[in-house]
């Protein structure tokens, strides 16, 4: 007997079935915009070009670059136990990160579009024995079809913002139906745990934010040395993971500051690399000389703005700039991750819209390891103050590093919570080899 789904989920499933006819058109449009890999479109329909490995398989799904980066140490721990792993994600940039940094033997696929037949095709091929979902990327059909196969499902580094919580309260039966499918929910913060529990999640445990335990991002030594030699002696600031509307403010701050700081160089790494040419255009409209990294353009003595429109190079940016504005925070996006910048010794500036990382930003601000700016005037003033006073800037970086270190430990707690499930898979694997 099939389960009775809430009306909203039945409507969603019906809509997704009908929408399947438009998937080829939507995918073709996304390919033109650089948002899909043309050669790997079949994966979005649940078609795999790789054989399933023999034995038990752990499937981990993360939405994009930030989520995948946060669980790389966890993936390494699971893989070190000899367990097969499949990792899925949904963006081109996350696919690039997977190619660069997933441990040897871990398979990456793009997650199927949330259409029932695509999802069933994906599950028929991979037959996962354990499914781990990272943070909050919960697609209804994927969750329903996975749980119907009695695959244990665990939410890892679970996150539920206040805004999402308020929206889900208008559909209590729907979110309860989805959350109850989890065997275990490992929440990033006590607030996340409370909100997940109130909406109906069973067995909620606060393990902490895995992003705090991620090692500082790497940087290619040759690339780093080359850029350091090029910009030697110049004052440098950076803006990382910026969103539309923020680059204009950064460019304006640079324009105001360069009179007092001759040779000032601003590095901008847009959250979505395909926006790089647009950032160059913004700089040009302000009368500034810009260079684009993906075009192979070099930093010269007259370069004002260097746009790093690449994947996986924030480690390079944070090592070059002593002061970094973290984007997604002067626009209503919710803020991007400040932890990597703190670990690499950058003094952090951010806007008021940081609910995605509210607890971390609050701790950094309280420890004076970061500073809040609300507009171009305050952004310019704070950048100028720290450029003028390197000692004060160093005090901010020390406070940020100490704060991040004090909040760690989530990786160990998450591993301990997953241990009973992984032990069962290992025992099954040994029995299969016997």
Image (tube, helix red, strand yellow):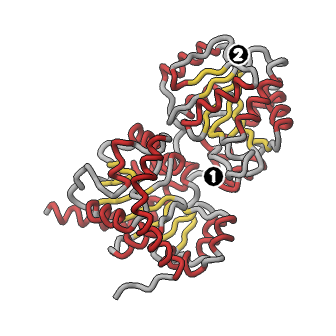
- Where is residue 329? Give x, y as percent: 71, 46
Residue at horizontal 51 percent and vertical 49 percent from the top: 70
Q: Nearer the viewer, residue 368 or 326?
A: 326
Q: Is residue 408 visible?
A: yes
Left or right: residue 202 versus residue 56 is: right
399 lies above or below 15: above
Where residue 289 sits, quadrant-wise, is top right
Q: Nearer the viewer, residue 74 or 8?
A: 8
State the SS at label 1: loop
Q: Nearer the viewer, residue 321 or 420?
A: 321
365 lies above or below 60: above
- Where is residue 416? Give x, y as percent: 45, 62
Residue at horizontal 57 percent and vertical 18 percent from the top: 227
- Where is residue 159? Give x, y as percent: 59, 62
Where residue 242 sits, quadrant-wise, is top right
Left or right: residue 138 versus residue 37 is: right
- Location of mark 2 (residue): 234
Q: Which mark is residue 189?
A: none
Q: Which mark is residue 407?
A: 1
- Where is residue 178? Give x, y as percent: 50, 74
Left or right: residue 36 versus residue 406 is: left
């Amino acid at each position: 007997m099939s389960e009775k789904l809430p009306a909203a989920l039945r409507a969603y499933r019906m809509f997704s079935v009908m929408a399947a006819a438009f998937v080829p058109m939507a995918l073709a449009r996304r390919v033109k915009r650089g948002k899909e890999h043309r050669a790997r479109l079949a994966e979005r329909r649940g078609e795999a070009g790789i054989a399933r490995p023999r034995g038990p398989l752990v499937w981990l799904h993360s939405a994009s670059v930030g989520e995948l980066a946060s669980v790389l140490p966890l993936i390494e721990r699971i893989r070190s136990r000899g367990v097969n792993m499949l990792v899925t994600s949904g963006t081109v940039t996350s696919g690039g990160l997977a190619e660069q940094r997933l441990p040897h033997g871990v398979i990456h696929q793009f997650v199927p579009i949330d259409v029932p037949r695509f999802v069933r095709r994906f599950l028929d091929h991979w037959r996962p024995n354990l499914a781990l979902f990272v943070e909050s990327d919960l697609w209804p059909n994927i969750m329903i079809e996975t749980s119907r196969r009695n695959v244990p499902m665990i939410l890892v580094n679970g996150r539920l913002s206040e805004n999402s919580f308020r929206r889900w309260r208008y559909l209590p039966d729907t979110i309860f139906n989805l959350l109850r499918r989890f065997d275990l929910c490992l929440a990033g913060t006590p607030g996340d745990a409370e909100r997940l529990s109130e909406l109906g999640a069973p067995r909620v445990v606060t393990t902490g934010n895995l992003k705090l335990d991620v090692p500082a991002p790497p940087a290619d030594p040759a690339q780093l040395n080359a850029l350091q030699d090029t910009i030697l002696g110049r004052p440098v600031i950076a803006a990382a993971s910026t969103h539309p509307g923020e680059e204009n403010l950064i460019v304006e701050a640079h324009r105001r500051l360069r009179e007092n700081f001759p040779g000032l160089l601003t590095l901008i790494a847009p959250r979505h690399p395909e926006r790089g040419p647009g950032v160059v255009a913004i700089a040009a409209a302000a009368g500034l000389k810009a260079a684009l990294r993906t075009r192979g353009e070099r930093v010269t003595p007259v370069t004002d703005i260097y746009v790093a429109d690449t994947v996986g190079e924030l480690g390079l940016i944070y090592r070059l700039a002593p002061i970094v504005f973290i984007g997604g925070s002067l626009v209503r996006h919710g803020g991007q991750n400040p932890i990597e910048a703190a670990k690499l010794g950058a003094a952090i500036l951010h806007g008021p819209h940081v609910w995605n990382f509210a607890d971390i930003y609050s701790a950094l601000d309280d420890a004076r390891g970061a500073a809040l700016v609300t507009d171009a005037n305050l952004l310019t003033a704070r950048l100028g103050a720290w450029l003028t006073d390197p000692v004060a800037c160093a005090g901010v970086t020390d406070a940020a590093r100490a704060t991040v270190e004090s909040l760690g430990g989530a990786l160990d707690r998450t591993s301990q919570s997953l241990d009973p499930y992984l032990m069962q898979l290992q025992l099954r694997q040994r029995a299969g080899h016997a």
